[in-house]
């Protein structure tokens, strides 16, 4: 029995390698077939499911991407790629809340495993894009709802004006003036509410001094200056082990996560989803 299990596992691994080779050659159908055979032999191995999901992703077959990714994260709760592709598939369905949650989980897992990998940057880009799409979707709905409510209120005021004019002969000027004031006040109120969704400048203190972009993972140096973690680590590795602003000696071990600023950034982004926009 054990020998049979080992043989099946070995065959599944060989099929995975075949699938990887087909994938590199862009033979997606053949790759899917190979991974499917591997799954048939060993259905509890998460990577077979994520590999097949990636093939479906390349084909824009988002229903199958979601199915395979869900299975992968069921088998391996710490699957970075599983959560990532699940998030992408859900965003395609405009299931923003669940999709963003999956991308955030993927980002946390990716940062924990290898904070400097290309995958972490890719996940962040997709998460920011999803957050912006969610804001844009909600903003558009709010705009339509406000416009409809504003029009309903205006109609109600104008109808009241007609009734009052009919009932209050001799005071039509006062009634008209009162209605005009109410319509102006209504316009002012709705204008202020709409201003909430108008983009503004991101405060400087929320932006990295090197990239000038809003912080994602801020760390503070002994000098008191805060930098984006990936950017300052890249500087230390490629430019030199010194603080880019003060020029004082600096080593990666001296960097400390700036939790207060990270929370401030998160609070700002929660209220201003437009700031997730990637130019």
Image: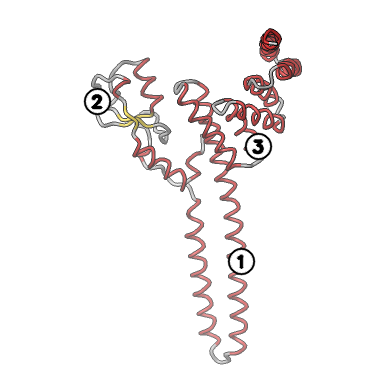
Query: Disc 2 versus disc 1: distance between alpha carbons?
Result: 57 Å
Task: Indicate which disc residue 151 carries.
Answer: 1
Give the structural element (helix, strand or loop) at label 2: loop
Query: Which of the pair 201/241 is nearer the observer?
Result: 241
Q: Which residue is mark 2?
A: 246
Which mark is in front, 2 or 3?
Answer: 3
Image quadrant in which you'd find residue 132 = top right
Query: Which of the pair 92/278 is nearer the observer?
Result: 92
Question: Is 191 on the left-hand or right-hand side of 207?
Answer: right
Query: What is the x, y in percent for residue 172?
Result: 55, 86
Image quarter in which the N terminus is found: top right
Could you tell me which residue is drawn at 47 percent across and 22 percent down? 113
Mark 3, residues whose alpha carbon is within 10 Å: few (<14), some, or many (≥20)? some
Could you tell me which residue is drawn at 24 percent across and 25 percent down? 246
Could you tell me which residue is drawn at 40 percent across and 31 percent down? 217
Q: Is residue 7 visible?
A: yes
Question: Is 206 on the left-hand or right-hand side of 72?
Answer: left
Q: Is residue 203 depicted above or below 119 in this figure?
A: below
Ranked by sequence position, the earlier of labels 3 and 1 is 3
Task: Indicate which disc residue 92 carries.
Answer: 3
Give the structural element (helix, strand or loop) at label 3: helix
Ranked by sequence position, the earlier of labels 2 and 3 is 3
Please give the count of numbered marks on the rendered protein: 3
Which mark is in front, 3 or 1?
Answer: 3
Q: Looking at this view, name the residue that lies furthest to the front.
A: 1
Query: Which of the pair 45/237 is nearer the observer?
Result: 45
Could you tell me which residue is drawn at 34 percent across and 18 percent down? 236
């Amino acid at each position: 029995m054990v020998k049979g299990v080992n043989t099946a596992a070995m065959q599944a691994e060989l099929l995975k390698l075949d699938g990887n080779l087909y994938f590199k050659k862009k033979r997606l159908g053949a790759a899917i077939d190979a991974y499917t055979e591997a799954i048939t032999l060993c259905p509890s191995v998460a990577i077979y499911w994520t590999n097949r999901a990636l093939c479906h992703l390349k084909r824009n077959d988002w229903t199958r991407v979601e199915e395979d990714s869900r299975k992968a994260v069921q088998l391996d709760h710490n699957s970075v790629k599983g959560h990532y592709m699940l998030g992408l598939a859900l965003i395609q369905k405009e299931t923003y809340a669940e999709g963003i949650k999956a991308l955030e989980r993927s980002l946390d897992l990716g940062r924990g495993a290898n904070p400097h990998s290309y995958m972490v940057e890719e996940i962040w880009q997709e998460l920011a894009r999803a957050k912006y799409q969610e804001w844009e979707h909600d903003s558009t709905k709010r705009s339509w709802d406000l416009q409809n409510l504003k029009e309903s209120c205006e109609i109600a005021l104008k109808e009241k004006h007609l009734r009052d004019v009919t009932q209050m002969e001799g005071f039509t000027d006062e009634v008209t003036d009162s209605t005009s004031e109410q319509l102006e006040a209504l316009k002012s109120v709705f204008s202020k509410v709409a201003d909430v969704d108008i983009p503004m400048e991101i405060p400087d203190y929320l932006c990295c001094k090197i990239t000038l972009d809003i912080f994602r993972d801020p760390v503070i140096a002994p000098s008191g200056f805060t930098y984006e973690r990936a950017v300052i680590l890249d500087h230390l590795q490629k430019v030199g082990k010194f603080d880019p602003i003060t020029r004082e000696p600096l080593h990666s071990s001296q960097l400390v996560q700036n939790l207060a600023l990270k929370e401030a950034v998160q609070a700002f982004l929660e209220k201003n989803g437009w700031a997730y926009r990637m130019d």
